[in-house]
Amino acid sequence: MPLSPSSSSFYLFLSSFSFLLLLPLSLSSPFNTSFFIDCGSPEGSTDAFNRTWLPDQFYTGGSTAVVSEPLRFHHIAEKTVRYFPLSFGKKNCYVVPLPPGRYYLRTFTVYDNYDGKSHSPSFDVSVEGTLVFSWRSPWPEGFLRDGSYSDLFAFIGDGELDLCFYSIATDPPIVGSLEVLQVDPSSYDADGTGQNVLLVNYGRLSCGSDQWGPGFTNHTDSFGRSWQSDEDFRSDDSKSVARSLSTVEKIKGVNQAPNYFPMKLYQTAVTASGGGGSLVYELEVDAKLDYLLWFHFSEIDSTVKKAGQRVFDLVVNDNNVSRVDVFHEVGGFAAFSLNYTVKNLSSTTVTVKLSSVSGAPIISGLENYAIVPADMATVPVQVTAMKALKDSLRVPDRMGWNGDPCAPTNWDAWEGVSCRANSQGSALVIFQIDLGSQGLKGFISEQISLLTNLNSLNLSSNTLTGQLPLGLGHKSLVSLDLSNNQLTGPIPESLSLSSLKLVLLNGNELQGKVPEEVYSVGVHGGIIDLSGNKGLCGVPSLPSCPLLWENGHLSKGGKIAIAISCVVFVILVLLVIYLCCIWRGRHDYDFAPPHDLTSLAAKRNRYQRQKSLMLLEMESQHAKGMPTLPLNSQ
């Protein structure tokens, strides 16, 4: 479903407006979120329309350059570019944080021989995992030098915009600027088309006006839409009868929710000269898609004063869509619009004919949007897991692990990654990861356990460290090759739940007991190699595991034994304490001495004091030379 800019209508809608006179503009929006990113510029700026442009940011990789002839580009954001050489991988993105809602996105793309190679690149562009633009070399001369604008409407529901560029062959994708504006979520019949589609602009025409659009003149559009002249879309017959009308009168019913169509759109119109006849527009399209046509009318001819004076049929591909009487619907100088969806196309041209019933037909504007169904995206939880793996494994830039791992489905998935639809056919899941011998130096994130559909994992011959995630392995896992790394720790029990037929863990530093279910892979006809892991034990050809030690720590039996020992010890201590308490209870007595023993001790104490006093007196007399009497002379 490539939307190739090879058709003339696509080129016309992408035509550059940079050569137009710059006039002041203040672009306002009824919503809060907008980004104007000057891709390739290291500095922010304010342009002639008073819009603030951010320095280049939110990109995943790439390099910057300046166009060869910057003086030819009057708009400040058109002078620099970001390009994505193959050294940054085949897929690179702008990932812009956004609150959920509907957004208008516009990119400016220019080559202008910025690299001096005189070779315009071939590349694809996706939004939220859906292919929206395809550029193929060689570009037309006008685009090579002047560049072009592309725009669309998309719903963003996951908190960030993924605008991704995919290299064709070895060509580097390129972008000059990115504009993102939040719009009314109900705009452009969102209830009818649904949120699961993108509206890609195939032509937004202002009838009876020169090329015109916000960012290029002083007329604002709350949605930031650019409008171009309808002249190149008229059939050859219509060119000769078309007559332009314009007014400066105010138009009623403009800038109304949910579409906020600007007044300027309804102040010009095209009618058929001669008071009758028909107007015919030829819109080139891709026959594989449906298209949403939006028609704008305003009766700005003051000579039309009543209903029935100007009536015409609106016919699309020979189908009479509606009979239109603008004055009958809204009166004079008032905005009126209606839309129609073209389906089941059999050619690459949509023909719009305004055929007179009474008076000449009139039209103020015409929009043509391809209704592009949103491609299947990867299950969000698996996107989270893959981004965690990208960081933990230190996947190099050259592998292009950016944006959705699997979408768009017509692109290759991330290098080394294979995807498939889930069982419901509603989303994509990771099926295989093959990153053997890629120079990875990180570790395996625990979030790999979220890849519940993984069939094969090969991370062999890298320099991965750390332990194997405890949740590694689901029923879907058949092949596991982690050989020749520096992985440590035990083999997780979760691998026992897998359907493994190939297990290569050799050449690591794993340790501990090998789960019997994992070892049984070899017994049941599969292939298992655990050699080179000196710390593994517990299965044939490997040493027996220590009785109480397993996987670098206490085994389950050891823990049980220690627990039982502790319980026995506590019971014995409690038993001893209990027995002591019983013994003390049986031999309890009063430690105060009996009364007679107390009297005897008192008498003995008096005798000892008297004897001590007599000894002291005798020592005193001996010291004075007095005769000493025997103690018992008394």
Image (cartoon, helix red, strand yellow):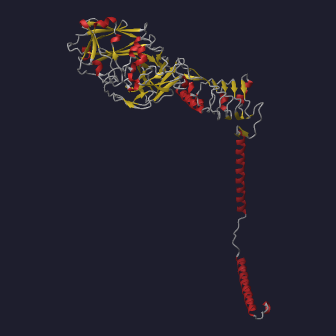
Residue furthest out toward the bottom? 626
Q: How many marks?
A: 0
Image point (34%, 7%), residue name: 235
* Residue 604: image location, x then y, percent: 73, 81
Compared to residue 517, the image places residue 336 above or below, namely: above
Using the image as rendered, state which of residue 89 and residue 146 is in the foreground: 146
- Snapshot quadrant of residue 355: top left
Q: Quadrant of the C terminus?
A: bottom right
- Snapshot quadrant of residue 592: bottom right
Compared to residue 590, the image places residue 136 above or below, namely: above
* Residue 239: image location, x then y, percent: 31, 7
Compared to residue 446, the image places residue 634 above or below, namely: below
Left/right placement of residue 627 relative to residue 363 reads right
Q: Is residue 103 visible?
A: no
Q: Is residue 448 visible?
A: yes
* Residue 394: image location, x then y, percent: 59, 31
* Residue 537: image location, x then y, percent: 74, 34
Using the image as rendered, state which of residue 112 and residue 560 is in the foreground: 112
Using the image as rendered, state which of residue 598 and residue 523 is in the foreground: 523
Image point (69%, 26%), residue name: 503
Left/right placement of residue 554 relative to residue 385 reads right
Using the image as rendered, state which of residue 429 and residue 163 is in the foreground: 163
- Snapshot quadrant of residue 508: top right
